[in-house]
Structures are given as structure tokens and as C-alpha cells.
Image (cartoon, grey):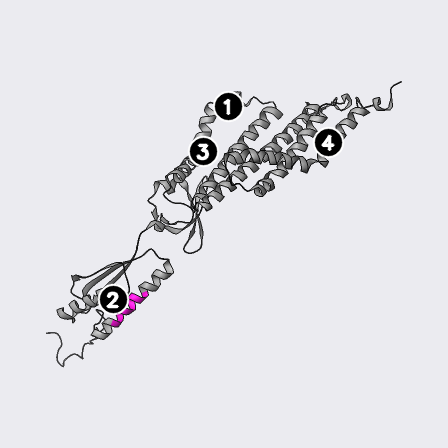
Amino acid sequence: MPGFWDYRIFDNPLRSYVIVGGTILFVIVLKRFISRLIAHFLFRFIQRMSAGLDRSDFLKLVVGPIGTFLVVLVTVSSIEKLHFPVALDFDIYEVKVRAIVQAVAVIIVIVSFIWLLMRLVDFIAVVLRQKARAGQVPRDNQMIFFIRDFLKAIIGIIGVLMILDDAFKINVSAILASLGLATAAIALAAKESIENLIASFVIFFDKPFTAGDVLKVNHVSGTVERIGLRSTRIRTDQKTYVTVPNKQMVDSVVDNLSLRTQRKGELRLELSLATGAAQLDQFIEGVRKILVKDRMQSGTVYLDNITGSAFLVNVDYFTAPVALEEFNAMKQRVNLDILQLMEEMGLNIAGSSTTISVLTPGPPEPGGGRD
């Protein structure tokens, strides 16, 4: 007579259910301890390759995924030791329930493993970001984000292929090898996306600009906030958010205003023709002294042209690459000093004293009819 533990339920003895349930319960209870222990050994291994890592950040990112993956793996492995009940092995739309259960279990294991790998990628990104800050190279942060997103996309694609191969028993390699014209058609349809992806690599390795730079490209001026796999996001001077495909950022002429060594100020004056030559020479010399007084790095003042209505005086000067608000204040100060000089010398802008007279014809003379 079979004992109590040999009593069979759904083709499995009660002893097997107790062992499986106890194993799963044991892992769930000690999940956090075991996952922290595994994370600790994993951290020590990573620390050998790069010193100065933050252990708390690593544990915060990977302990949860390690615990989940451990529970899922032990649960699936333990349940596989049981015999699948014959009573439950029926078809659903010509698919065995056993095959469905196995596919779901494989999907859960693969998803939990992919989640763990993505968290490891996040930790690598955190480490690289900390090193960029320590090395005072904040521009490399965008490169780190790009690499992180790219690796996550690759891992996600690999995960999908693993699910198709292991869960649904689809021969992925045979499908990829036999795509032929379909692959060419897909590549042609995705031509723009592929070009933008390649352009993103060109941007990151050639570095014509990085996140935080102020650019002018295709009549768009603003600050680069993010460089993605497909496009670059720019916050314009009007505070709008413009998305520019990376291919255009590579093919177009990009003016990186953040890398300029100076800012240029310009002033075009049209002085009245009543101004004498001596006054013009004195005025030009006075403007030069203003540029020196206002500490411009360099400047040019000259009589550019003489027209039928004015004397054209050009004023060009350069400042340090200061912020726009500071540059506007310096420009205003120069303009006001020049206006004050003109007032002191009694000079006028061309056309400022022009008088316009409207003449009306008088009454016709007597007897002025037609002959």
C-alpha cells in the first residue's frame, strides 16, 4: 500500500510537489540575501577592471533583476522536474497545452535575463558618466547616453530572436538567410532610418557638436539638448523644440556658435552730407577711442563710401565669447557712447533734417484758353 507521500495528484506523487514548492519557497524567502550575495561577487569582479566604482549604485540597479531572474529560473527548473499531467495535455487551436506552457516559461526566463543585462548596461553608463564628470568632460555624457541606448536596442533585438528561436521553435537563422528580396525591400524602405543611424555614429565619433552646444543649421538656431539614434533635438531661441534628422545635421553646413573665439558687433552709420571732412576724421578717431575705452578686443572704424545722400561709416568690433546677455549690454554701451559723441560734435544722421515741401499749382491765368 503506497504511503502518504506517494499519493499521486495529476500524475505526480505528493512528495514531488512538496519538494518543488519547498525549493521555490526557499528561494523566495532568501531571494534578497542570495541576490545581494551574487551582486557582491559580481561587483568585486567588475571592480578589478575599474577601480573607484560606487557599490551602492550597482546594488540598487542589479539586486532586483538578479532576484527576479533567480526566482524565475529556479521556479521554471523545479516545475520541469514534474511530469506534465496527461489530463491537461489537450489541444488549443491545434497547439498542445504543454507546448504553450513551455513557451511561456521560456519567454519569462529570457525576459528576466534581458532585464538583468539592461540593468548592467545602465550601471556601465553610470560609471562612465561619473568618470566624465571627474575628468571634467561633461560633453561626453551624450555619447554615453547614445551608447547605452544603442546597446539596449541590440540586447532587445537579441532577446526577441531568442524568444522566436527557443520559445516558438522558429529557425531564425534559416529565415534570415532566406529573406532575399524581402531583406532588400525592407532595407530600401528603411533607407532614411539607416542613413540617420549611420549619421549619428558620424556625429559622435567626429564630434562637430555635442549636447549643450549652440548651433545654427538650416535656418534653425538653438541649443542641442539631445542627440538620438535618429535625430538631434534643438531648443531654439524662441524656446520651441525642433527635431532635425541626423542625416541633415551631417550633410548641412553647421555653424557651432559655442566654439567661436569672439563675438562680433556691427554698426552702420549714414552721416549727413553737411558733415565736413575734418569733422568726419575727428568722429572716426573718437569712435576708435570709444572701442578702446569699452575694452573691445579689436575694432575697425572707417569711412566706407560716399553716396549722393550720406557718408557711410562702418564700425566693426569684437568681444570675448561672452554670454548673449552680456554681449547685448556691451553693444548697447558702445551705441550710446557713439550717440553721445555725435551729440557733442553736432553731427546728424542723413535724412534727419530733410524738409519735404508740397507745392500746389495756382489758378490758371485769365485768357489762358486754348488757341
Quadrant for residue 336, please give it: bottom left
**Mark 2: which secondary structure?**
helix
Give whichever of discs 4 and 2 has the lower sequence position.
Answer: 4
Q: Which residues are magenta?
A: 332-340
Q: Earlier in the sequence, mark 1 or mark 4?
A: 4
Residue 108: x %, y % from top left:
64, 31
Q: Position of residue 339 (x, y in %)?
A: 26, 70
Asked whether residue 178 is in view, the answer is no
Q: Is tag 2's residue or tag 1's residue first in the polypeptide sequence? A: 1
First in sequence: mark 1 vs mark 3: 1
Q: CA distance from mark 1 to mark 4?
A: 39 Å
Can you tell which mark lies on residue 15? Answer: none
Question: Which residue is label 1 attached to?
Answer: 176
| Residue 112: in magenta span | no
Q: In the rendering, at what x and y percent does residue 17 appear?
A: 78, 27
Who is closer to the viewer here, 182 or 298? 298
| Main secondary structure type of the part rendered in magenta | helix
The 10 Å Cα crowd at callout 4, few under 14, some 14 to 19, many 20 or more, is many
Q: CA distance from mark 3 to mark 2?
A: 59 Å
Please, what is the three-letter code of the amino acid marked with disc 3? Ala
Element type at mark 3: loop
**Residue at the image point whose x is 59% and y is 43% from the top:** 56
What crowding class fits label 2: few (fewer than 14 Cα within 10 Å), some (14-19), or many (20 or more)?
A: some
* Res 102 → quadrant: top right
Whole-angstrom CA distance, mark 1 to mark 3, is 17 Å
Above-or-below relation of 168 to 216: above
Residue corresponding to mark 2: 290
Q: Which residue is mark 4?
A: 24
